[in-house]
Amino acid sequence: MGGDSQGPDAAALEERPPVAPAAEDGDWRSVDWRTHQRWENVEGRPVNTIQLGSGPPLVFLHGLSGCWPNWLEQMAVFARDHRVIALDLPGFGHSPGQAGEVSMHGYAQLLDALLAQLGLDRATLVGNSMGGLIAAELAASFPSRAERLVLISPAGLSTYRNRLTAGAMPVVRRLEQALALGAAWTASHADNLATRPRMRELVLKGVVAHPSRLPGPLAAEQLRGAGTDGFLSALEAILEFDLSERLPLIECPTLIVWGTRDRLITVRDAARFAEAIPGARKVIYEDTGHMAMLEQPASFNALLRDFISG
């Protein structure tokens, strides 16, 4: 069990991750995902979604530079008894970028409109990194929409005006075209990169603790989502968004999940989230990076199922 030691405050309760159960029969490779793809026109903006299953709604939100396949290890499993929805946020995956200013609150508003369009009064929201920030902002701004909240290494606290990242932004902006070409090359060579252990280690070591442990096909699907045009605008929007004053407004049951080897957002933020959100639970995975749902799928799925069953 990692993270800082906690006092008796229930809001900062830290738990051990569940022991991984036997493999579940929801292998994502057996699903024809094309049959579940739906374009939703949300406030005049086309949004790529994947929708399958029926039952209580479960909505998955990817992180910066991510896309809906970040949730492949969860979607087929939970579609057996839930209505499962994942989307490409504007500027990521197959969803075109949005015109005008990009903001985290704007993404939350778009998500609220999407849920309304899908006829969902309430849903459980599961978000990673930037997706966690957006899910938390939706729960704070539109509390009636959030049934439950699961935040996996969410942005919004130490990322706010992060000196290291913000200081590098002018250089990154000057290199924008070169970076875009590099990301596009990675996406177009996803299968080759994923099957070569050294290359897989190089391109994924920033987000997962042990890239070599990811199955090759799953790693390839993560790399295929690179090369989109929303990265820099969304990164700047994250750096300018302070979630700290919004967290006490969250009213729904909340689960915080983090990995001790998260290289992108410090695991120390887990305690800050758990303390700021009333009644939040916190689970820390040892030897795990920024994407616990991909790195520890069986254990994470058991944890998620237990949490949403109440």
Image (tube, rainbow, N blue to C red):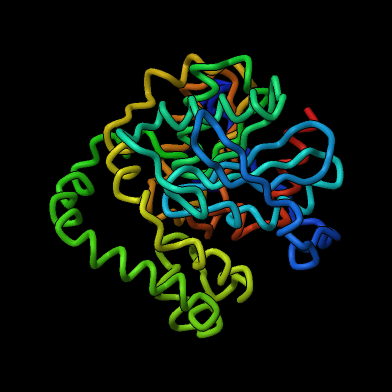
Total count of labels: 0
Q: Is residue 65 left or right of residue 222?
A: left
Res. 17 visible in picture: no
Residue 216 point in image, percent of width and height: 61, 76
Q: What residue sits 54% from the left and 47% below the top? A: 88
Residue 74 point in image, percent of width and height: 71, 51
The furthest residue to the front: 44
Q: Quadrant of the C terminus?
A: top right
Give the image quarter of residue 40: top right
Res. 102 visible in picture: yes
> Measured along the vertical axis of the image, is residue 114 above or below residue 232?
above
Residue 80 point in image, percent of width and height: 86, 47
> Measured along the vertical axis of the image, is residue 32 above or below residue 217?
above
> Measured along the vertical axis of the image, is residue 278 above or below residue 283?
above
Give the image quarter of residue 252: top right
Q: Is residue 185 left or right of residue 176?
A: right
Q: Nearer the viewer, residue 63 or 181?
A: 181
Q: What residue sits 79% from the left and 31% below the top? A: 56
Q: What residue sits 31% from the left and 69% below the top? A: 181
Residue 173 point in image, percent of width and height: 18, 53
> Measured along the vertical axis of the image, is residue 220 above or below residue 91?
below
